[in-house]
Amino acid sequence: MAEDKLPTRAEDFGEWYNKIVLKAELADYAPVRGCMVVRPYGWALWENIIAVLDKEFKATGHVNAAFPTLIPMSFFEKEKEHVAGFAPELAVVTHGGGEKLEEPLVVRPTSETIIGHMYAKWIKSWRDLPLLIVQWGSVLRWEMRTKLFLRTTEFYWHEGHTAHAAKDEALEEMYRILDIYEDFSIKEAALPVIKGTKSDTERFAGAQITTSIEAMMQDKRALQSGTSHYFGQNLSKAFEIQYLDTNNTLQFCETTSWAISSRMIGAIIMVHSDDQGLVLPPRLAPIQAVIVPIFKSEDEKGRVKEVAGRVFTELKAAGIRVKMDDREEVTPGFKFNDWEMRGVPVRIEIGPRDVEKGSVALARRDKPGKEGKTFVQQAGLASSISQLLIEIQASLLARATAFRDANIHDPKSYEELKQVVADGWAFSWWCGSKECEARVKEDTKATTRNIPLNQPAGTGKCIVCGENAGKKVYFAKTY
């Protein structure tokens, strides 16, 4: 295989993914091991993700702020479970300005501790609650095995941190955000995620409850695509986040935290893309339609470019994110392949015959080849393309949902479960014991992904030990 050629998913799924990230110019490897440089096209995709979520957060009363990248080491020692969970991943600064620091500083892996410290200063009364703050930025975790977008030493995200007067308010916040994440994933990213609660083993360090959205990739592995946590009073007691209630009694706050990271881009790639390259859902694609003028002579060039320019102006005025590919140093065929690799949902081809007929050729990225090719009139083109983008978005979601559902199984025995999770997900009754969970992981490398909120009626027998079980859980191998 030529070094630069994109392998098929069947040949090497991992290398197929890596090559798409590089060849579509989403990101590149940084000089520091495990870090990445997000290129403009990849950052434009991330900006579109940010725009949707930021709007949702603000609509539910959240505000943005920024906290320091460097956090005193002593902060991490205040909440023992939290620091134990992150200790292996911490990057620590011991020297600054040419001198050894009095106290080591941690490059933030997450911000519960620094934000908890500040909340303790800011919150005095029940009137200060709820406090709903979101931070956008990057964090650093010293990962041993890295993969662009999916798991990098430094990655980008938002992290929400909220403080409440009552437990039920904090729990409502946790589930509200989980619903926002599910809605975003399905409607914007066309990812049919499953929301649920993590097991105690898989729970976020320091949290009392962790909820998540889980997505199935095309290699049938699971990807945790977003999390929302309820901390109860764990962090409040560690950092003395207290308020005077209406009876003038000092109380500890109830807190939450939650995040979606740039790993969402990895999910989009692995769920939707094909052997020709990247496939992007139209609602998030940086470029929704690309115009490719086709001509051979100067006479044809003038006529084609005039129509192409008019089409470009019309689509842009209609709010479609459109690109004119007017490069003359490469062939139309090269352009077709280039934009297929970059996952642009719709390609608009305009040649001399199209000019004469008052038409254009449209090529759908989600249906390569003749199946996705249609000819439409130039009149009302903006409306035609807007409708086509809606159809492509729905098609991607339907295809991903069908794939997911076809690869989730309900095994009838533990031996069958072991076979299922070798190449799919198992949805099985589980007694809730850590011992059964650990046995599955040891025997199969599969873990519990989440206990879905939407549970079947009744009870069953644990797929591992045979004891009575009240809930079903997803078992799958994961990234």
Image (spheres, helix red, strand yellow):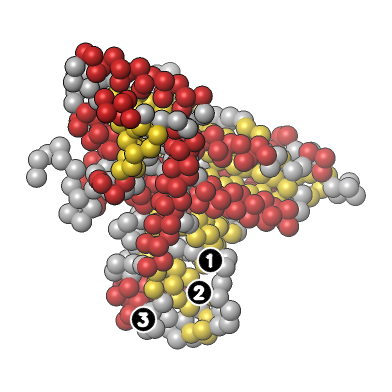
Whether residues under marks 1 and 2 lie with C-beta atoms below 8 angstroms apart, the answer is yes
Element type at mark 1: strand
Q: Which residue is found at the position 58% from the left and 53% from the top?
A: 178
| Residue receiving disc 1 | 452
Task: Tell which circle, 1 or 3, labels the residue nearer the N-terminal end.
Answer: 3
- Which percent across, then down, holds residue 54? 58, 36
Viewer-nearest residue: 234 or 311: 311
Q: Which mark is residue 414?
A: 3
Residue occupied by mark 2 = 472
Instruction: Compute the Cα span from label 1 to label 2.
Output: 8 Å
Residue at 32% from the left image edge and 56% from the top image edge: 218
Residue 219 picture location, percent across and down: 30, 58
Q: Mark 2: few, some, or many residues within 10 Å (few <14, many ≥20)?
A: many
Using residue 4 as the reference point, say whether residue 431 is left or right of it. Answer: right
Amino acid at circle 1: Pro
Return the disc, 1 or 2, that comes first in the chain's sequence: 1
Residue at image point 73% right, 48% down: 164
Q: Is residue 308 above or below residue 361?
A: above
How far apart marks 3 and 2 lie (CA) works out to: 14 Å
Q: Determine the secondary structure under disc 3.
A: helix
Residue 93 appears in view: no
Quadrant where the image shows the C terminus: bottom left
